[in-house]
Image (spheres, grey):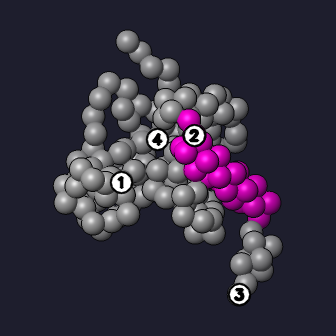
Amino acid sequence: MLPWDRLRRTSGPERRLLAEAASLLLVTGAALRVCPFPWLRKGLALYTRLRAGRLPADRVAWAVSAAARRLPGWFSGCLPQALAAETLLARHGYRPQLRIGVRPGGRGPETRQSGLEAHAWVELRGAVLVGALDDLSTFVPLERPGAGASLCRRHER
């Protein structure tokens, strides 16, 4: 079955969710290239204030993953996917947690001169919704004040 045939068979709300996920992936992928990370997070936090009706969390994760499979590399990497998923989940009334982790000696595309490999994922109630890997437990989540805080809450001092 061709992708367009599958798209026509999805419901209206799922098509809108897929379009929103693709838009967020494009925005986050581009913004990560030109904006400081805190600015992007603040912008996405503003977007989450535009609440949407509550859709099942697994459908939101599906939309982000499905849209990412159809976009070029820098729009569909783990960080744009995690940011888009976190934003959409928060917009739909959930309290997701963005996780960014590192591990030494990586050989993947995220490996830098430091010899660290990075990965981003989103958890909801302790379960990984977006960014699951077979070896995810080998990544050490970065911790700092406010890290992993949900976009739907304000930072507290």
Range of residues picked out in magenta: 11-35
Residue bearing mark 3: 1
The residue under label 2 is which amino acid type? Val
- For label 2, the SS is helix
Give the spatial CA distance, label 3 vs label 4. 33 Å
Examine the structure image and report whether residue 30 is included in the region drawn in magenta: yes
Give the spatial CA distance, label 2 vs label 4. 25 Å
Q: Given contact means CB atoms under 8 Å apart, are the residues at marks 1 and 2 in contact?
A: no
The answer to whether 147 appears left or right of 102 in the picture is: right
Residue bearing mark 1: 119
Mark sitting earlier along the chain (2/4)? 2
Give the spatial CA distance, label 3 vs label 2. 38 Å
| Nearer-the-camera pick, 36 or 92 | 36
Residue bearing mark 4: 96
- For label 1, the SS is strand
The local crowd at label 3, few if under 14, some if 14 to 19, many if 20 or more residues have their Cα within 10 Å, is few
The residue under label 1 is which amino acid type? His
Where is residue 84 shown, x and y percent of the image?
Answer: 57, 48
- Identify which residue is drawn at 73% across, 56% down: 19
- Identify which residue is drawn at 60% across, 35% down: 44
Residue 156 seen in render: yes
The residue under label 3 is which amino acid type? Met
Where is residue 153 shown, x and y percent of the image?
Answer: 50, 25
The residue under label 4 is which amino acid type? Pro
Relative to 116, is 62 above or below? Answer: below
Where is residue 110 shown, x and y percent of the image?
Answer: 36, 58
